[in-house]
Image: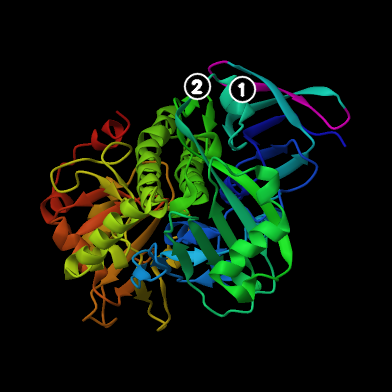
Amino acid sequence: MEHDQKTEVLIIGAGPVGLLLANFLGAYGVKTRVLEKNSTYEIEPRAVSIDDESLRSLQLIQLAEPFKQQIVMGYGVQYYDWQNKPLAEIKPNTQDYGYPKRNAFRQPDLVKLLVDNLKNYPCVEVLFQHQLLNIQQNDNQVVCQVQTGEQQTIQIQADWMVGCDGGRSMTRELIKAKLEGHTYPQKWLIVDLAERQCSLRHTQTFCDPVRPAIRLPGPNRTLRYEFMLHASDNDQHVLQESVFRDWIRQRMPADADLPLVRKAVYSFHARTASIWQKNRVLLAGDAAHLTPPFAGQGLNSGIRDVTNLAWKLAAVLKWNLPDSLIKTYETERKPHAAALIKMALQIGTFMQPKSKWSAFWMQNTLRAACLISPVKDYILQLKFKPKPHFPQGWFVAKKHHEQAELIPQPYVQDQTGKVALLDDYLGQNFAVIGWASRNFCHEIKKFIPPNVPVTCIALLNQDEDFIAQDIADHFILLRDCHGVFETIFKQHQAVAMIIRPDRYSYNMLTAQELQASVVDTQHFNTAFA
């Protein structure tokens, strides 16, 4: 089959990060090609935890609802001390972004969902057995040399290229980006099992210096065990079923004889690429950062990457925004990815006590701290997780909006009486949200970035109904069911906001700014500085 050797975006790697980026771009109508060096999609159950931010990203392309049917939503983590006694637990019950904070899933299920959804986007093509060989760039395009499954060398031209090709990224190597950080000598054994009998849905973490271990129940009666290995352990020895089944039996006898799905030994990394962009080539997912597994944030960080990047590529290619917008991707994403790596290392230190004495000291300190209500709430509600925000990037910075934040996603009600999550009304566009009035509908226009599609929301507070609201016809009238936006607006002294397609705040407007007869037209351009 002859293929057009030109595309708007070329993605290297058909893992979940690359496939999600392809779905996002497909929804924007961006001509996209995905190259995968292997003969098929990755089917191993690698990542097992997906968070609320990632489910919200799937919601952008209407995949959150079908995916919810395949996952265990809202699981917690139970920690046990060195004597196998209950120590602490994390069971967050808030849903700031519309979904539970921790959810168990199977990576092959997510991959299948993303692959099947690509059928809705004829502008996206996936090519297997295509190996990236070399990259050449100029000011306008990337030219890639690629080897096909027939051992032919072809050239593919693209306006932009994104390497989603994993921890051993060829893209990263070709742009000469270095991995900075550490690879740790500590190894772990993973054992995936099927036909789980125990109904406990929460993860159990055994902080035992003799053999730290984690038990992670998954959907469809799946189960994962992870065991820390010592320097004296031999890989081939610990991979013997008789060995690891005995370790499992010590934790939960009922699990010891379950059918084996997969076993593997891995080392963990805490590293980020020195650069995430070189001209028109970018990195995302494991190609850009390698995260320790202890916080379950590796794939989630990759999903954040492409949620940030996809709309920017579409904005440059379809909405005539300047290329400089793409430079804000690394500015915004790299610090947050690094913060999550740091958090994972801190959790890992707690999970892997080096001796009974260190276990006794750390665990009893935590037990005492949890007697203090605010500390217990801080731990229980997962408030130690770095907030999704950035102090620098593409937004309008000012005294009452010093950093862009991922806005909460409340339930809203429309005029038909339907109650749904806010993002269901926003699509993949920019959005403006403000208190319902004819003045808001008229004045907000001058603050909207030019050339971009915008969804306009006129908002009622939770105490108002839909009687005689005077708003423009193209505005959607919604009621904030629980007063979430009233709290946000008060916090920022604002009456309206502009929201980016990735649901981060672009601008917060006070009443005085909204009513100003003259607007500083430079605010849009300075956001690129």
The picture places residue 296, in percent across and down from the top left corner, at 47, 54
Q: Residue at x 51, y 59 (%)?
A: 213
Residue 290 in sight here: yes
Picture quarter with the N terminus: top right
Depth check, front residue: 95 or 409: 95
* Residue 25 drawn in magenta: no
Residue marked by disc 2: 279
Q: Does the magenta stretch include residue 149?
A: yes
Going by the numbered disc 1, the residue's amino acid type is Val
Q: In this view, does 320 lie above or below 467?
A: above
Spot occupied by residue 486 in the image (x, y as percentages of width and height): 20, 68
Q: Magenta span covers which residues? A: 138-150
Judged from this view, the residue extending furthest toward the left is 512
Give the residue type at disc 2: Asn
Q: What element carries label 2?
A: loop
The residue labelled by disc 1 is 142
Q: Would you say residue 123 is visible in this rendering? A: no
